[in-house]
Image (cartoon, rainbow, N blue to C red):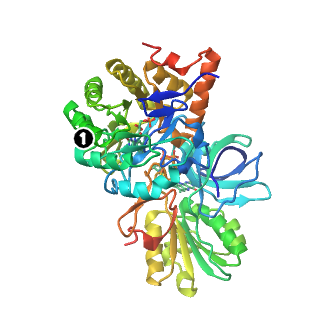
């Protein structure tokens, strides 16, 4: 699976909220490379003069027919704000697809729990679709502070059951993802999570208490995205530093120290 | 087409003056999907030490105005691993592969260098006496003439191929250090390594980097680097390799005009993984446009 660096064309910027948008990117010149769920793009934000390094953003969905993929971007600082200001027709320089993605289990009919919070739900959409296409049954468990934090629910529903929690009780069950009743009412073969660190750690602890394999997608600070600079490391259980960009961003949580 | 090949000492022939800087280009293979490595003068691989090192804790980087800080701290799997596992994969690349060697005493610099001397397809090493991110060794040797001389002296005995010494900018008088390593038999000097810096997260009231300080690189350091290359090129007879914030061919030409015989591309690889090749092509184009027949005609042109 080779990596590319290219100017892609923005075909649409769907605002989901003031500070969230889905950016659709099209390659007019060549067929998109194979993209695995959980892989990411290093975006160069040329129109943001103070944004020096590229910004890593997960691949949210892929549309092979349109030769497009999309990014779900949360505007938290200058670089991501500038991404939300993109207009159809603009070019965006993308280095992709990077990293190792989520596992698609062998066989079919596996029950997977995909647990996301905040912008961490981004890679779970494409993962859910690929799972469904492979004959598995994903359940999405999405958490937020409030109803307005839950994004792309209609799209998630196309690929599996959607369960939600909000901390203020405005949508779904009241509480955090690990409080949701589905964890007791349904059994799962494997778990995947992406979102704020405390959420992923809680999910990993829960999975580990049931001996379920659990994969988490990490969001460490990155410079190169290629495994060349060693800036993005995380500690493994045997105390080695490994690259999140190249060895991850998706890891089996048993491999990492932070779960303890 | 202008002539762009340059020599560093007797043993290192570069097809063009563009090398990639250690620590910013992995082992080259990370970029093989994206660029033709054969179009580079050479690749300088990750800092390698005699024994494996885990490096510093995360966070290891921070973005800064037109640059970045890093405190990676020489994470690598050691010289023996390099020789047995990595060298076979990169030895037949159609470019020069150089190893950046670091250590914590003159003896282990020398031992590591001796191992590299055994590798037929490594024509040169770059001694890193300028890493600001490790406590034991590294920059400690590069900030005094005596320290720098002691490492070069030990390595010179163990290593008879082309020896490049990479200098630290975190010194009062870089020219005197350059002279000290020249006197001990270095074949070339490269400069600059990163400038020590710091970035504080005012919300957390703490430094962003795990060890507090880090090394600054990128365009932010370029004017400092050009000035130092100019000073060192005046002070020594051996070739000077210039680096620090080179993003474009024009930046590279600035270093050549300051007196550098070759240049290295570092942080720019993160912004554009094709930067090194584009810079090599851009130098060619610029020379042709200016009617310059040989890159040597612009080396030191600003003196
Ligand atoms: C593999 C990976 C996948 C990611 N996927 C997405 C995604 O799909 N959608 C999305 O919106 N964001 C994603 N992120 C996070 C995104 O990269 C950062 O939010 C972005 O780099 C911030 O840039 P900025 O210039 O807007 O903010 P800055 O001005 O750089 O920072 C603003 C704030 O964001 C925090 N921040 C900066 N970088 C990161 C980071 N890497 N992770 C977490 N917080 C950060 C800073 O600490 C600061 O508080 C991902 C990160 C990684 C490593
Ligand atoms: C992430 C990172 C890692 C580095 N690792 C090394 C190293 O192992 N050995 C070394 O001599 N220099 C190392 N450097 C310094 C660079 O090789 C170079 O001297 C410096 O970054 C200045 O050049 P630039 O501005 O073009 O990056 C590193 C720099 C960065 C940014
Ligand atoms: S970001 Fe450079 S190695 Fe991961």
The reply to whether residue A48 is visible in this rendering is: no
Residue at the outermost left position: B146
Residue A222, image x, y percentages: 48, 50
Q: Is residue A21 above or below residue B152?
A: below
Q: Is residue B152 in view?
A: yes
Q: Quadrant of the C terminus of chain A?
A: bottom left
Q: Viewed as shown, does residue B103 lie left or right of B223?
A: left
Taking depth in this image into account, of A29 and B261 the one nearest to the observer is: B261
Locate residue A2 relative to residue B159 in the image: left or right.
right
Task: Judge the density around disc 1: few (<14), some (14-19), many (≥20) Cα neighbours within 10 Å.
Answer: some
Asked where in the image residue B272 lies, by quadrant, the reply is top right
- Find residue B287 and report its horizontal and vertical position in percent: 60, 20
Taking the spot 35% from the left edge, 65% from the top edge, the residue there is A239
Residue at the (31%, 45%) spot, across then down: B133
Residue furthest top as drawn: B303
Quadrant location, the N terminus of chain A:
bottom right
| Residue A184 against residue B290 in the figure, above or below | below
Image coordinates for residue A198, horizontal then vertical, percent: 43, 66
Q: Residue at x 33, y 56 (%)?
A: B53
Report the side of B209 relative to A92 (left or right).
Answer: left
Q: Which residue is mark 1?
A: B154
In this image, A175 relative to A131: left or right?
Answer: left
Image point 70% across, 75% down: which residue? A134
Q: Nearer the viewer, residue A241 or A129?
A: A241
Disc 1: which chain?
B
Residue B159: give x, y in percent of width and height.
Answer: 33, 41
List the single residue furthest toward the right. A65
Cβ of mark 1 under 8 Å from ligand 2: the answer is no
Helix, strand or loop status at disc 1 = helix
**The one of A148 and A200 positioned closer to us in this rendering:** A200
């Amino acid at each position: 699976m080779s990596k590319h660096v290219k100017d892609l064309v923005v075909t649409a910027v769907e605002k989901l909220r003031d500070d969230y948008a889905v950016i659709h990117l099209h390659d007019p010149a060549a067929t998109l490379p194979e993209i695995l769920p959980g892989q990411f793009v290093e975006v160069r934000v040329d129109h943001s003069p103070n944004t020096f390094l590229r910004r890593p953003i997960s691949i949210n969905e892929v549309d092979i027919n349109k030769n497009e993929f999309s990014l779900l971007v949360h505007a938290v600082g200058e670089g991501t704000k500038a991404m939300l200001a993109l207009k159809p027709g603009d070019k965006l320089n993308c280095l992709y697809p990077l990293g190792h993605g989520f596992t698609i289990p062998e066989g079919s009919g596996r029950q997977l729990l995909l647990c996301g919070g905040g912008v961490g739900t981004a890679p779970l959409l494409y993962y859910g679709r690929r799972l469904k296409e492979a004959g598995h049954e994903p359940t999405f468990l999405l958490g937020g502070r409030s109803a307005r934090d839950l994004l792309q629910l209609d799209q998630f529903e196309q690929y599996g059951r959607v369960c939600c929690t909000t901390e203020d009780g405005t949508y779904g069950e009241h509480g955090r993802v690990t409080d949701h009743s589905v964890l007791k009412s349904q059994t799962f073969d494997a778990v995947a999570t992406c979102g704020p660190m405390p959420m992923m750690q809680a999910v990993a602890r829960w999975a580990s208490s049931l001996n379920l394999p659990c994969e988490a997608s990490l969001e460490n600070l990155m410079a190169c995205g290629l495994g060349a600079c060693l800036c993005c490391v995380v500690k493994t259980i045997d105390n080695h530093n490994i690259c999140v960009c190249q060895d991850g961003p998706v890891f089996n949580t048993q491999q990492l120290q932070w779960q303890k | 087409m202008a002539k762009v090949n340059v020599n560093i000492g007797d043993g290192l022939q570069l097809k063009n003056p563009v090398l990639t800087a250690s620590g910013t280009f992995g082992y080259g293979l990370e970029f093989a999907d994206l660029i033709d490595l054969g179009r580079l003068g050479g690749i300088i691989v990750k800092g390698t030490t005699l024994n494996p090192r885990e490096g510093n804790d995360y966070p290891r980087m921070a973005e800064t105005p037109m640059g970045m800080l890093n405190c990676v701290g020489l994470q690598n799997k050691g010289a023996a691993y390099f020789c047995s596992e990595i060298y076979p994969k990169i030895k037949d690349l159609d470019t020069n592969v150089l190893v950046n060697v670091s250590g914590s005493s003159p003896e282990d610099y020398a031992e590591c260098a001796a191992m590299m001397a055994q590798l037929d397809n490594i024509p040169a090493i770059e001694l890193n006496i300028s890493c600001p991110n490790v406590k034991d060794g590294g920059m400690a040797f590069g900030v005094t003439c005596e320290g720098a001389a002691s490492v070069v002296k030990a390595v010179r005995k163990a290593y008879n191929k082309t020896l490049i010494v990479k200098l630290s900018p975190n010194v009062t008088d870089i020219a005197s250090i350059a002279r000290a390593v020249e006197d001990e038999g270095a074949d070339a000097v490269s400069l600059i390594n990163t400038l020590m810096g710091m970035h504080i997260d005012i919300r957390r009231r703490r430094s962003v980097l795990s060890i507090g300080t880090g090394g600054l690189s990128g365009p932010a350091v370029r004017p400092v680097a050009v000035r130092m290359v100019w000073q060192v090129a005046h002070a020594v007879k051996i070739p000077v390799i210039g680096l620090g914030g080179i993003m474009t061919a024009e930046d590279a030409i600035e270093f050549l005009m300051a007196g550098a015989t070759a240049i290295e591309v570092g942080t720019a690889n993160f912004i554009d993984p094709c930067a090194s090749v584009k810079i090599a092509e851009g130098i060619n184009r610029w020379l042709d446009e200016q009617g310059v027949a040989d890159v040597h005609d612009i080396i030191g042109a600003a003196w």
